Image (cartoon, grey):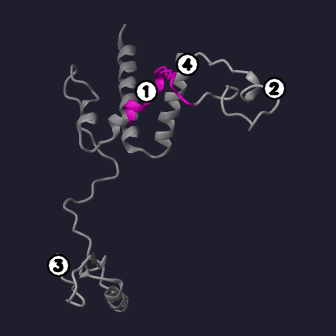
Amino acid sequence: MAVCGICEEAESKYKCPTCKVPYCSLACYKPHKAEHEANPLPPPPPPPPSEPPAATTTTIPEVESENQDPFAPLLTTPLTPSLRKHLLAIHAATQKPAHNPNSNYRGRGGRGRGRGRGGRGGGGGGGGHETPEREWTEEQGTKAAIGKLRRLREEGNEEIEEFVQMVVGLIEKETEQGDALP
């Protein structure tokens, strides 16, 4: 173990958060701290940027081949690290939620912890009126996914915005090609 950097007698147990000098006790640290307050160290200069900052919009390489997945550049470039996570979350919103019978949440009106001890109705609280579980529909899933996508776009997520623009471009291209056919 190191020796106290202030009194240089006792074994150090702590380090100054400002300069990392080891010290043994509060008695040694207090005058040392006062020195820092009297002569503050200048903040370290920020490291120089290794690359010039890129433009606010990132450019993804164009698709070279008709057979190539048009979204592959978006999903593989390091410029869009969380796009895959966001797309999976949007997809998960379209799926039927798994029913968990071990869930502690019973919803409103279910049996369980109710209104204190006893109460009216001689039951376990809630009066025994159990609300039926609503059947999940594909329309609910679609609405949930659209809501999640809308929230991501409203938050200014550039990755999602670029993905949406790419999808819109592909749809427009398909529409133009469909209109050109006899």
Determine the residue located farthest toward the top in the rendered image. 182
Residue 44, x across and y down, in percent: 26, 76
Residue 63, x across and y down, in percent: 23, 29
Is tag 1's residue or tag 3's residue first in the polypeptide sequence? 3
- At a point 36% along the width and 41% down the height, the residue shown is 159
* Left or right relative to 36: residue 4: left
Q: Secondary structure at mark 2?
A: loop
Residue beneath disc 4: 139
- At a point 59% along the width and 15% down the height, the residue shown is 135
> Is the N terminus in the top left, top right, bottom left or bottom right quadrant?
bottom left
Q: Residues within 10 Å of mark 3 (few under 14, many from 20)?
A: few
Q: CA distance from mark 1 to mark 3?
A: 55 Å
Residue beneath disc 2: 121
Q: CA distance from mark 2 to mark 4?
A: 38 Å
- Nearer the observer: mark 1 or 3; the answer is 3
Residue 158, x across and y down, in percent: 39, 44
Q: Secondary structure at mark 3?
A: loop
Residue beneath disc 3: 2
Three-letter amino acid code of the residue under disc 1: Ala
Q: CA distance from mark 2 to mark 1?
A: 41 Å
Three-letter amino acid code of the residue under disc 4: Glu
Q: Secondary structure at mark 4?
A: helix
Q: Which residues are magenta?
A: 86-104
